[in-house]
Image (cartoon, helix red, strand yellow):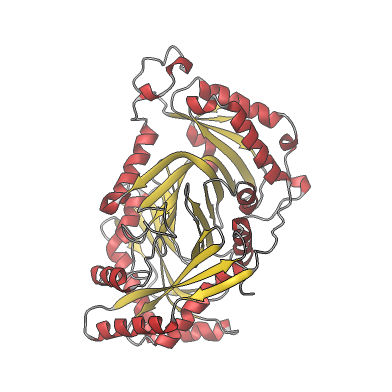
Amino acid sequence: MNPAPTTSSVPATLHAPDLMTELDAGLAIAGSSLGTTFIALPAPVIPGAAIVDEMREHSLVAWASAELSLVGVDVAVELRGRDQARWAEVVAGAHAFATNTADVDDEPRDTMPASDADAPLREQPLRAVIGGKTVAVDALGFARPRFVGGAAFAPGVADKAPWTGFGDAWFMLPRWTYVSAGDRALLVLAVDARAAADAQRWRDQLGLFRTAFTSTLSIVGQPPLVEVTPASADTWRTQVTDITDAIARGECSKIVAARTCRVDLGGAVRLAGVLAVLDDRHADTVRVLVKPPGAGALIAATPERLVRRDGDLVECDALAGSISPNGNADAAEAKLRASAKDQNEHQLVVDAIRSALADTGEVSAPAQPNVKRLRHIIHLHTPFKTVLRSPRHVLELAARLHPTPAVGGTPGPFAREWIATHEPAARGWYSAPVGWFDLDGNGELAVALRMGVIANNKAHLWAGGGIVAGSDPDKELAETEMKLRAMLNALGVQS
């Protein structure tokens, strides 16, 4: 998320009644319309963490990458998917919203214009209001409506603490969405006629955003540390040995094992503080926050894109094989490139992605992997591009790809069964898809790595490693410690 603004970067309208006037004009239009109206208001470019800090008691989602930063507050529309049909159910729900297939009798008919009162569906299901004038939703551009959320690693693994409330798949269209791209930013309120009638509520909440816009974000440290409880090192070593034995028997080629760590603090974890540290130290990753109603908060700083769709263009990442810089990144990179073990681990992911995308379009990728250097780790990286032969929703593509061998293993069914029956703690949303999609099925999903789920004063962290032939239990243990470092740093546990 972007640097904190100076006073001069705040538009004058934020200090004047004009912003409230624009809000009221939008609410008046929404109150006499069918369906959903998106009211866009001018905003400064600020750190998303500042909004999270002001709105910390609300349901929240956030996404920050090099191209886009957004924070969503409260739920306008919620989509859930369950079991094996979870992806299809979310797509169907989004389609129903975008095409207004819901029964319009649910709308408050006494607020409808007479010309629309008897229409079963509107000709223009959605609209935007910019500067008090009605325009097409597409006019919102970078601030167009987006659903934000994610899914569990597998159905049924996110139904117990600390994952209670997350479920198999959950996305929300935020009530309020703050979006910035480059030097542009907008604050967008999504309301139907019934919600628009509660005008004072939206004026009051706009006041909270104005506070976030005009204040300097000051993140103090987290509450004092009480205890750090990593999962047993001996249990981890046994897991690695069990996997390499299965590989030696020819049962599989790779399994990605996960290890947990719990952090207890002396008070509630400050979510905005965690995000601010991740934004500062890991700007080369995607930072994600997902906090469903009544649930804890998933926070991640992930280096791995699962899939991005922009029209006909699809992009994916193969990210597998890693090494610590150990103070000499050039030497570490050379060692990683020369490692037959890591090259083999990486190639398994490359082959799986190519196979998953093969019938969707022309797939291209470099013949040899690149490297991706991050603060604490270096990865082998192969970027993929595909031009779709026919439109496919980004969630359909995600369902094809997830889990790649980078987070599951190969063959997939054996690896998923091993993970379900051998790992001490259910993964929940760890190493699963998180991100956003728009009403046209474009979007971007990352893999929830370098992450934790935070509930009150506890943070439950996950890290993993790809186990292949030749994997050494102690080296794999050290890799998990290295991968946990980003979140431990953000919690103030390690410097």
In the displayed structure, does residue 17 sit left or right of residue 109?
A: right
The residue sitting at 52% across, 55% down in the picture is 289
Q: Is residue 132 visible?
A: no
In the displayed structure, does residue 140 sit left or right of residue 357?
A: right
Instruction: Tell me the quadrant of the picture where the N terminus can be found.
Output: bottom right
The residue sitting at 66% across, 50% down in the picture is 46
In the displayed structure, does residue 315 sit left or right of residue 11?
A: left
Please determine whether, in this image, residue 121 is positioned above or below residue 216: above
Please determine whether, in this image, residue 201 is positioned above or below residue 337: above
- In the rendered image, the residue lying farthest to the top is 114
Using the image as rendered, state which of residue 88 and residue 357 is in the foreground.
88
- In the rendered image, the residue lying farthest to the left is 250
The residue sitting at 33% across, 64% down in the picture is 403
Res 247 quadrant in image: bottom left
Percent across and percent down for residue 18 are 70, 29
Percent across and percent down for residue 352 are 30, 68
Marks counted in the figure total 0
Q: Is residue 482 visible?
A: yes
- In the rendered image, the residue lying farthest to the right is 8
Percent across and percent down for residue 139 are 52, 35
Res 107 quadrant in image: top left
Percent across and percent down for residue 220 are 70, 61
Instruction: Tell me the quadrant of the picture where the C terminus can be found.
Output: bottom right
Please determine whether, in this image, residue 77 is positioned above or below residue 104: below
The residue sitting at 24% across, 71% down in the picture is 414
